Image: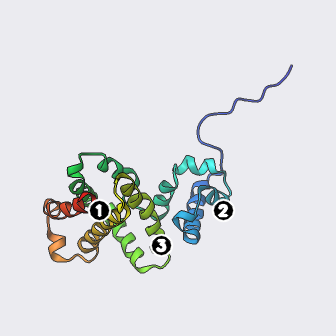
Amino acid sequence: MTEHPAPRRRGRPRGRSDARARIIAAAVDEFAERGYDGATIRSIAGRAGVDSALVHHYFGTKADLFAEAVGMPLRPDMDVPAILAGPREEVGERLVRYILEAFEDPDVRRRGVMLMRTAVASKLTTPLLAGFLSRELIGRIARTLDVPDAELRAGLVASQIAGLLLTRFVLKLPPMAGASIDDLVDRVGPTVQRYLFD
């Protein structure tokens, strides 16, 4: 009688129990050495000693893995496309409100401030975060704009948002730190809207 191999079980790919931690450690090293654009799922998997499928299983995309590795408090690669797909005349205000309301969460604020402080102070983190934002935020915004200067417009939006977060949550300038979300949305939203569409 011929023996048939047992059917392969569905579920998570096989891997040592510490595989997830090794993948994160490998990702941190790869991102640090190669930058966001240079690191690949394959190179991270190789460094961690696992199959690429296991990296995808645990983390999905490279953006997901990066967010996990550096503790990204927000996921612009996931959230911004929905904002951009909404009513065009509301995009600026919706984008500013999304950021400010997200930072009302104490954990998001704590991790966001830590990341901003690190990015400003560290020669290692600055290009890493810049690469992620260039591809996952600025690039996504630019692709939705049908204008020759789309990347500049998207960069101006990013600079406006970064300045808003820096002055409100890191420097804690009294007028900015004390302003209501509605007031900031009313004042900053039209500027973001102008950068995008005017």
Amino acid type at circle 3 is: Pro
Residue 106's disc is 1
Q: Which residue is mark 3?
A: 127
- Left of 12 or right of it: where is 79? left
Dots 1, 2 in contact, CB < 8 A: no
Q: Residues within 10 Å of mark 1 (few under 14, many from 20)?
A: few
Picture disc at residue 128 = none
* Mark before the other along the chain sequence, 2 or 3: 2
**Residue 143: horizontal and vertical position, in percent?**
39, 54
Neighbours of disc 3 within 10 Å: few (<14), some (14-19), many (20+)? some
Q: Name the amino acid, label 2.
A: Arg
Say what secondary structure mark 1 lies in: helix
Residue drawn at the location 63% of the way across and 56% of the way down: 42
Q: Position of residue 150 (x, y in %)?
A: 35, 60
Mark 2, residue position: 47
* Snapshot colouring: rainbow
Q: Position of residue 92 (x, y in %)?
A: 23, 57
Q: How many numbered discs, if any?
A: 3
Residue 82 in the figure: left or right of residue 16:
left
Q: Quadrant of residue 120?
A: bottom left
The secondary element bearing badge 2 is classed as helix
Residue nearest the observer in this picture, 144 or 32: 144
Distance Cα–Cα, label 1 vs label 2: 34 Å
Q: Residue at x 54, y 49 (%)?
A: 58
